[in-house]
Amino acid sequence: MPEDFLVTLYTGSRWGAGTKADVFLQLISQNGTSDVHCLWHPQVPSFHQGSTDRFLLTTREGLGDICTLYSLLGRTRFKCHCLPFAWPKDQGGISPALPLKI
């Protein structure tokens, strides 16, 4: 059964923070991994200095609790070093989970 996750990413406020590069995200859980998702909005630029960006990611199958995220910036793959929060979305609304420890 597909599962939805609301992912919130915070871009730092230091000078030079942010990117115009393509950003991709993959969710990793004990039950499996998601596809790689491209994070973008057709009308609002994302990942600017001091910004908060939210993306709704849908997985093909339920992943359960997420244990880590992988972020891909351009062609580079690395463990996400920002402070992400992921919430599984159920029929009753969005239930917050604990912050992910990465």
Image (cartoon, rainbow, N blue to C red):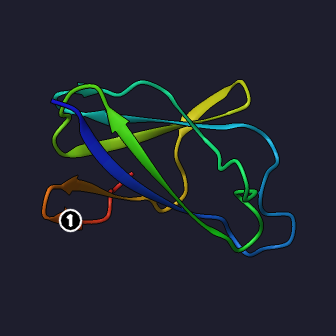
Indicate left or right for 45 with 51 as reference: right
Which of the 4 quarters of the picture holds residue 96?
A: bottom left
Residue in the foreground of this view, choosing between 14 and 44? 44
Q: Which residue is mark 1?
A: 93
Q: Is residue 81 above or below residue 93?
A: above
Residue in the foreground of this view, choosing between 85 and 2? 2
Which of the 4 quarters of the picture holds residue 91?
A: bottom left
Q: Amino acid at mark 1?
A: Gly
Q: Quadrant of the N terminus?
A: top left
From this viewpoint, which residue is outermost toward the right? 16
Please give the name of the residue rendered at 71% of the width and 74% of the height, measured from the top-left corner. Answer: 50
Q: Position of residue 95 (x, y in %)?
A: 19, 66
Please give the name of the residue rendered at 35% of the width and 38% of the height, measured from the top-left corner. Answer: 58
Disc 1 element: strand
Q: Position of residue 34 (x, y in %)?
A: 35, 28
Q: Position of residue 71 (x, y in %)?
A: 55, 38
Indicate left or right for 64 with 10 as reference: left
Q: Position of residue 74 (x, y in %)?
A: 73, 30
Indicate left or right for 59 with 74 as reference: left
State the count of labels: 1
Which of the 4 quarters of the picture holds residue 62?
A: top left
Please give the name of the residue rendered at 78% of the width and 74% of the height, measured from the top-left corner. Answer: 14
